[in-house]
Amino acid sequence: MIHEPTAPANLAKALNRLAKLRFGSLRARIAVLYASLFAVVLALVVTLAGSGLSRFAETSAARDLAANARVFDEILAARARQMGDQAGVLARDFGFREAVATGDAPTIASALSSLQSRVRSDAAFVLTLDGEVLAADASAAPAAADLWARLDAGETRGIIKGKDGLALAAAAPIEAPDLIGWLVIAQPLDRAELDRLVELAPIALEAQVVEASRQPGWLQAANTGDVFERQEGERLLYHVSDLTVLQEGVAPRLVLSHSLTETLAAYSGLKWLLAALAVGGIVLVLGLSWRVAHSVTQPLQQLDAATRLIGEGREVVLSITTDDEIGRLASSFNHMATAIEERERQIIHVGLHDGLTGLPNRKLFTEQLANTLARRRDGEQVMIAYVDLDDFKMVNDTLGHPAGDTLLRAVADHLREDHPDALIARLGGDEFAILVDGIAEGDSLGGIADALQRCFGRSMTINGQAATCGASIGIAMAPGDGNDGVTLMKNADLALYRAKHEGKSTYHFFEPSLDDAARRRRQLEIDLRSAIRDGEFELHFQPLYCVAERRLTGFEALIRWNHPTRGQVSPVDFIPLAEETGLIIPIGEWVIREACHHASTWPDDVSVAVNVSPKQFTATGLASTILQALAASRLPPQRLELEITESIFIADIDATLTTLHSLRNLGVRIALDDFGTGYSSLSYLRSFPFDKVKIDRSFVEDLGTNGNGHAIIRAITTLADALGMETLAEGVEEIAQFEVLEREGCRHIQGFLFSRPVPAIAVAGLLSDGAGYQRQICA
Ligand code: C2E
Ligand code: CA
Ligand code: CA
């Protein structure tokens, strides 16, 4: 018997532990959990079946024992009946009755012994009414008195105590015709007899007849018919019953015992089979659940692998084989993957293209350029053109950003239309780059450049108005000007720089000298930085002459750079560079401080004019620099004049006007320098109440030719007068120019005619020599 009440509890604990386990794979977890669950159920079934089997074996053994005891009883009774019949035959025999009646002992003995041998009885005797026992061997018979009690009670069969132990006896009455005695025959109830009986039993048992007086204590407690179990090294089942007795003082009990251990041992084979089946079942379930888990987790694994592939940026499509949740998951995954790919494509596109024009951006251009260069065949040339739109900033600022955007889009469209085979990119702002490959040895490079230039000359419509937009183009060729993208782009940029400086709407091919120029520029920049530190700058002053008053009313401060090796460097050469590099800010601050300082030493009616560059103008801190310079020099603000150029209006006009007003609020005067060279000078004149308008030298030069110079000067002075602004003509070199200017209403004059810019030290001399000018002019 599988007697393991703790087995299910153990299994439940194990299962609990399993559930808490964290398996690396879902598949193992599912398989083990399912198998464990099955094992628990199976263990319960096996345990129940086992104990049921044991109980069945026990109860059927008990039943068999009791049945056997009854069979035993019946057999004994049948035998006794048979013995009684045999005794009855003799007891009814006439001769025998007469022998008993007459007390003929020899006849009785002979009859008894022949009966004894016939029925194989070991004892036969006659019990006479007067208590005598007549037998061949009277010693084998019990005391007559002990038998009489039973016989008188009508019992004729039962156990008696014979010479050699217990015996089964049957008595027959001897009547002649009244009862004259009893014929009793007995057969021994010995081991052999019991063994014979035992052989008849269907189950293995042991039978024993125990005298009541000799039975052990545990047996005494048992009532007849009781079935009970005892542990005597093995499990024994006992059945006790009292046997019918024919003799007083005899109490034999039939004790049947049966080994339960043996019976259960017979069942143990069955139990082992059951256990083997259970183990087999568990293995089977483990295998099956492993497979089921595989079918569940395999799609998950595929999904996991696919997700990883997507993470690596690879394209993945899961095959949809089923119509269930897994199939739907795969389909959703595919949708997601497609969406991710699409979005990635968009992101890549956005990352490599310009949002406004849709053209490739600088990154894509450099990539493609590298590819093209790598693919380039011998004898083939590649052209890289760098394009910068002329006056785009002005369009943007005057017509607004939407107009600027329209212009850029139109330019992009024209380029795409005219050069479908070229790679066109927008590098940013108004800069474009064009890559033309596969140019053969004999092809006209100028022709290609002209075609590019023409493309920018095409007219377009902006804000409903026809417009054109020229461009400056710098061109570098591979392999001549470089073999790698970086060099080529740099050289094309240098060529563009040159093209810009040569004037609008031109192109320029790269040439090595440009590289030298760039290098010189870099050196100049380095020198410029140290120039501030080393005090290499100096201010020169050029007088401003008032025509009406016939006297010098002020000086324009003009910077000079005394370069340690190059000598004096013209501001025309270094101011633009200072502008580009931002060095103009510290330089400009120095100029303002220095100019104020000098002016403070001049007479009260002589002012100083300082040039303020656009970069300086838009930078924060200009007003405070001026305030500090005025405070430090104690120069009254109205004696300081700031000269600004029209180019400041190209930037944000509102901000420009704000700055102009804030400067004006300091009390300083503001002059519009180089008037007439800008894009729409007259409109600027109306936008702010300048104190002075400085008419550009080019108009004064024009006075010599027979053009309409006079009319222009007249127009400017008339407008300026009307707006309450003073006028000053720059670059007056000849007396004839002076006379015309005076006639056309110009109030102030500046130029070599009076004096070149002079060092500060010479200012005093010029002031004291004021009368000299007058003489010169009047002469
Ligand atoms: P600008 O403001 O137009 O200055 C006048 C320029 O014309 C000066 O050249 C002056 O020497 C020159 N000039 C004066 N009268 C005559 C004449 O009769 N004939 C000819 N041909 N030229 C004459 P300069 O000093 O070489 O300055 C050139 C430019 O450099 C200036 O033009 C100005 O834009 C810039 N500049 C000079 N000094 C400074 C400065 O301190 N700060 C800034 N931001 N710019 C400066
Ligand atoms: Ca000036
Ligand atoms: Ca000027």
Image (spheres, grey):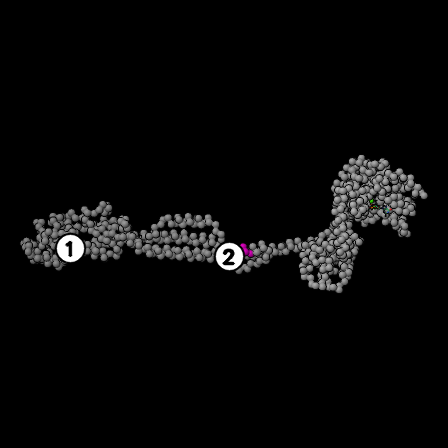
Q: Quadrant of the C terminus?
A: top right
Residue at 80% x, 35% y: name it. 634
Q: Within 8 Å of ligand 1, the CB of disc 2?
A: no
Amino acid type at mark 2: Gln
Say which of 510 and 502 sits in front.
510
* Kind of element beneath mark 2: helix
Residue at 14% x, 52% y: name it. 162
Q: Which residue lies furthest to the right in this view?
A: 779
Say which of 64 and 192 sits in front.
192
State whether residue 342 is above or below residue 668.
below
For the residues labelled 2 and 1, the Cα–Cα distance comes to 85 Å
Give coordinates of residue 118: x percent, y percent: 13, 59
Amino acid type at mark 1: Gln
Mark 1 packing: few (<14 Cα in 10 Å), some, or many (20+)?
Answer: many
Number of the label disc, if any, that sits on residue 298:
2
Q: Which of marks 2 and 1 is in front?
A: 2
Q: Give the range drawn in magenta.
A: 299-307
Residue behind mark 1: 187
Give coordinates of residue 425: x percent, y percent: 71, 56
Residue at 59% x, 57% y: name it. 314
Give the quadrant of residue 123. bottom left
Give coordinates of residue 384: x percent, y percent: 73, 58
* Kind of element beneath mark 1: strand
Contact between marks 2 and 1 (CB within 8 A): the answer is no
First in residue order: circle 2 vs circle 1: 1
